[in-house]
Amino acid sequence: EPEVTQTPSHQVTQMGQEVILRCVPISNHLYFYWYRQILGQKVEFLVSFYNNEISEKSEIFDDQFSVERPDGSNFTLKIRSTKLEDSAMYFCASCYFGDQETQYFGPGTRLLVL
Amino acid sequence: GESVGLHLPTLSVQEGDNSIINCAYSNSASDYFIWYKQESGKGPQFIIDIRSNMDKRQGQRVTVLLNKTVKHLSLQIAATQPGDSAVYFCALTGGGNKLTFGTGTQLKVEL
């Protein structure tokens, strides 16, 4: 069964450093998403991406964040200068069509900013 | 803004009993609802979904009920098993393709 994969599973970084989180969505899916989950809290939407551009983003997704689909398979989230409060689980998700279609989530990357 | 809440943070049930997890939402424009299961250290796993033109949908051992009048969603798990222990989130979309998640209910299955 196809699934969303994410790397790395864990990332520890120093405050102010740049991190890139990587995702491989399900191969025939067209919509891609990043969500985050701070420990013990609910999952929060960050950004959606379709047709090589951002289609929607939340207020969390400020200028420190960017997304890219550098090739036909990878989808990345970059945080330019990490802050302590960026520590969270980051989930990538994908779906085939968009609104009212099931989003399938990857296993997540646990980011710890020291 | 959108808000999604759950009635109970923790639900404990005996193995074999039925479980009911509830969710309330505020946006009447919400048109697609999903239940996800999240085990410790893993990503949300799709369980079942329902569109706003339906009141009920059944899957294998799970049923989702939608009451649009009172903006309430529930997940029923029949014959709950130890493997059902997890956090359950309701999530919804409305007017866009982002998911808004609830705060989650921890389901604990006691042997």
Image: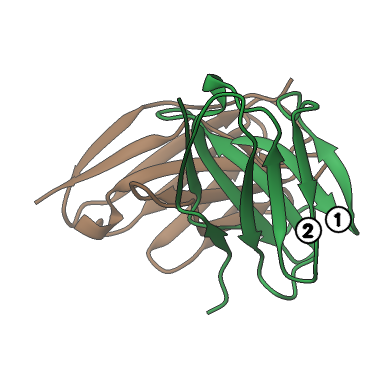
Amino acid type assigned to the residue bearing label 2 in the image: Tyr
**Which disc is residue A4 wearing?**
none
Quadrant (top left, top right, bottom left, bottom right) of the N terminus of chain B: top right
Crowding near the residue tagged with mark 1, few <14, some 14–19, many ≥20 C-alpha atoms within 10 Å: some
Rendered location of residue B74, percent (x, y) = 48, 42
Disc 2 and disc 1: Cα gap in Å?
5 Å
**Which disc is residue A31 wearing?**
2
Indicate the secondary structure of the residue bearing disc 1.
Answer: strand
Chain letter, brown in picture: B
Q: Earlier in the sequence, mark 2 or mark 1?
A: 2
Q: Chain of mark 2?
A: A
**Residue B44 located left or right of residue B15:** right
At 41% across and 52% down in the image, what residue appears? B42
Nearer to the camera, B63 or A29: A29
Indicate the secondary structure of the residue bearing disc 2.
Answer: strand
Query: Looking at the picture, do discs 2 and 1 lie on one chain?
Result: yes
Whether residue B81 can be seen here? no
Give the residue number, with chain letter if any, for mark 1.
A50
- Dots 2, 1 in contact, CB < 8 A: yes
Amino acid type assigned to the residue bearing label 1 in the image: Tyr
At 70% across and 42% down in the image, what residue appears? A78
Most distant residue in the left direction: B111
Q: Is residue B72 above or below residue A62?
A: below
At 55% across and 29% down in the image, what residue appears? B24
**Residue B109 located left or right of residue B9:** left
Rendered location of residue A16, percent (x, y) = 61, 25
